Amino acid sequence: MVDPQIENLLIVQHRDIELLKIQNDLARLPVEQSAAETAIEKETASIEAARQTLLAKELARKEMDTDVKAMEAALLRFRTQQYEVKKNEEYKALSHEIERTEAAISELEEREIELMLDIDQVKAQFETEKKEIQSRIEAHQRGIKVLIERETHLTASLKDAEAKVAESRKDVDASYLEQYDRIRKTAKRPPYVAKIEGQKCSGCHLKVSNEVARAVLNADEPHFCDQCARMVYA
């Protein structure tokens, strides 16, 4: 026959384990939420980085366009001056400047065309990646919403679980409770009250001594595994 105090302790233990699970779940929520928020920050940063890359290319194209217009204005000036000069040397010098400027304009226009093609490609890639990233961000945001809802539910469950533990402890003798609380603080994991099965403690799964195996048959005081110090019963 199982010690009535052990039977009451098993109820306490069951409710303690339920409470511990709720506490562990609650403890994980901030970590999971923080991870989701960090993921959103990284995804948002990647969008911004890609946008800045695109803006830099568009700015470079505008600068090239400005440079081309400035060179075209200079070219017009050189040609006007050609009509005004009288010396052959001056005419040749201006011709040289015109040729040099025309070559520079041609080269710059080619680079501008290449850059425009690159911008079109980068822009298309940016829009595609932006949609994919935004989709992942929305998934993380939905996940955070679920975590917040779960926190509300678990917080309510926590209060109920704490009340049930407190109520169940009222039926246990103080000397048993004292030993149970001691074990609960020192044991790495439940159970804190373990059954002896085949002369093995179901808590640590190690064989107990013959003395302990015989002692648990006496339902008059708490008994302990001589391997893990858990409270045991038969």
Image (cartoon, rainbow, N blue to C red):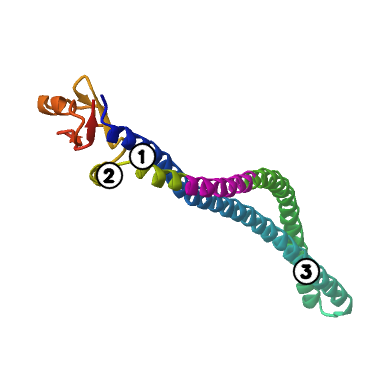
Q: Secondary structure at mark 1?
A: helix
Which of the two discs, 2 and 3, labels the residue nearer the N terminus?
3
User: Type of residue at label 2?
Assistant: Leu
Residue position marked by numbered label 3 in the rendering: 71
Residue at the top extreme of this rendering: 198
Question: Tag 1: Cα neighbours inside 10 Å, few (<14), some, or many (≥20)?
Answer: many
Question: Tag 3: Cα neighbours inside 10 Å, few (<14), some, or many (≥20)?
Answer: some
Which of the two discs, 1 and 2, labels the residue nearer the N terminus?
1
Mark 1 vs 2: CB contact within 8 A: yes
Give whichever of 53, 143 is nearer the camera. 143
Q: Is residue 205 above or below residue 115?
A: above
Tell me, yes or no, if residue 130 can be seen here. yes
Which of the two discs, 1 and 3, labels the residue nearer the N terminus?
1
97 is within the stretch colored magenta: no
Specify the quadrant that holds the N terminus.
top left
Q: Secondary structure at mark 3?
A: helix
Relative image position of residue 215 (x, y in whole percent): 14, 28
Residue 12 marker: 1
Residue 195 marker: none
Name the main secondary structure of what is drawn in magenta: helix
Q: Quadrant of residue 8?
A: top left
Q: At x 72% / y 49%, what residue is drawn?
A: 123
Relative image position of residue 207 (x, y in whole percent): 17, 25
Residue position marked by numbered label 2 in the rendering: 177
Q: Marks 1/3: CA distance?
A: 88 Å
Q: Secondary structure at mark 2?
A: helix
